[in-house]
Image (cartoon, grey):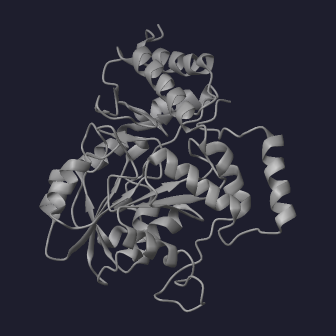
Amino acid sequence: MIPIMRPELPPLERYVALLQEVWDSHMLSNFGVFAKLFEARAQAFLGTPRVRCVASGDIGLIVALKALDLPAGGEAIVPSFTFNSTVNAILWNGLTPVFADIGPQTLTVDPADVERLLTPRTAVIVATHVFGAPCDADALRRVAAGRPIVYDAAHAFGTRYRGRPAGTLGDLEVFSFSGTKLVTSGEGGLIAAATDDLVRRIEFGRAYGFQDDYESHFVGINGKLSELNAALGVLTVERIEQAVERRAAIAARYRTSLADIPGLAFQHVDARDRSTYKDFALLVPGRDALEARLAAAGIQTKRYFRPCHTMRGYRGHATRPLPRTEETYARILCIPIFNELSDDDVDRVVSVVRDHFLEPPAP
């Protein structure tokens, strides 16, 4: 079977060598040597010192929103076409999600729809860099009119928007390093902040609300990244450029090989931007039949994202239809992409897709 994804791991002996250092130190957590080194390498890559590690991307989103000290019950405009974590973090912070539609080609939140949804109750805009393709950050900043913007950048470590790295686009951006990402710490995340004050609030928020005196300055959470996870992140984060380069090559091979299929479309990525291609999505007619054909050929796929406004846990916050989100979900199918996917396997996927759409009907 060709899996939908597979994490690229460093040579085991390199990881074991770092684990030996952890064992010798008996320091398993509490922002130890490897957590700090992981942060430092991420800071160097992003070109900003305002990056702090957390136990997961989910924890990062919760802490990031908490750091803004938003009023309880305030509205958070958020795309429905995102992973559940984005909406969960809003609700954990006592905010009210207001679901926005997406651009039909970019699959990221539509700034014009965000603008239509603004009210005096709007406290924050939470947007997602979908599959590693960046949101239109300049347009969102304009329509936000001074309101804070938090990016779910789970897919976007390595993404660039108009030459600027994700991590420098919003007030706060949260990366994930879970096992499905281009580079991984097993579980873990990073929060990038725009100001020193926000960084300080992140440092408190991820550590129970205190620093050195065990007195919580405000409500915090245990967001510590273990040294075991951080050590893995130290080894993988250094390969981010190679990972992005390989994903771009795979995406280009898919695009070129499937470009002539009638009705098939791809997510649009502006030529001025760079996507990480954490996932590669096809937008196809008759999605279910193609999904079955690929499964029969031993090729794993995924319908991604399921719109949040249709889920039982969030349906009470759905106040209107989101036609572009719903149409996208009816057509979307993510096909295999990962750092070590071979060209031969890419061509195997392509062959099945092409045969499905272009082979003559049986007599």
| Left or right: where 304 falls relative to 71 | right
| Left or right: where 16 falls relative to 260 | right
Residue 24 in the image: above or below residue 67: above
Q: Nearer the viewer, residue 302 or 131?
A: 131
What x and y, as percent, mark residue 350? 51, 19
Q: Nearer the viewer, residue 10 or 123?
A: 10
Task: Look at 31% across and 43% down and name the residue there.
Answer: 107
What x and y, as percent, mark residue 355? 49, 15
Looking at the figure, which quarter contains the N terminus? Answer: top right
Answer whether residue 313 is visible to the viewer in this image.
no
* Residue that protrudes farthest toward the bottom in the picture: 215
Answer whether residue 85 is visible to the viewer in this image.
yes
Task: Look at 65% across and 68% down and name the residue there.
Answer: 31
What x and y, as percent, mark residue 112? 15, 52
Task: Look at 62% across and 48% down and name the residue there.
Answer: 184
Task: Look at 29% across and 39% down and name the residue there.
Answer: 106
Residue 293 in the image: above or below residue 72: above
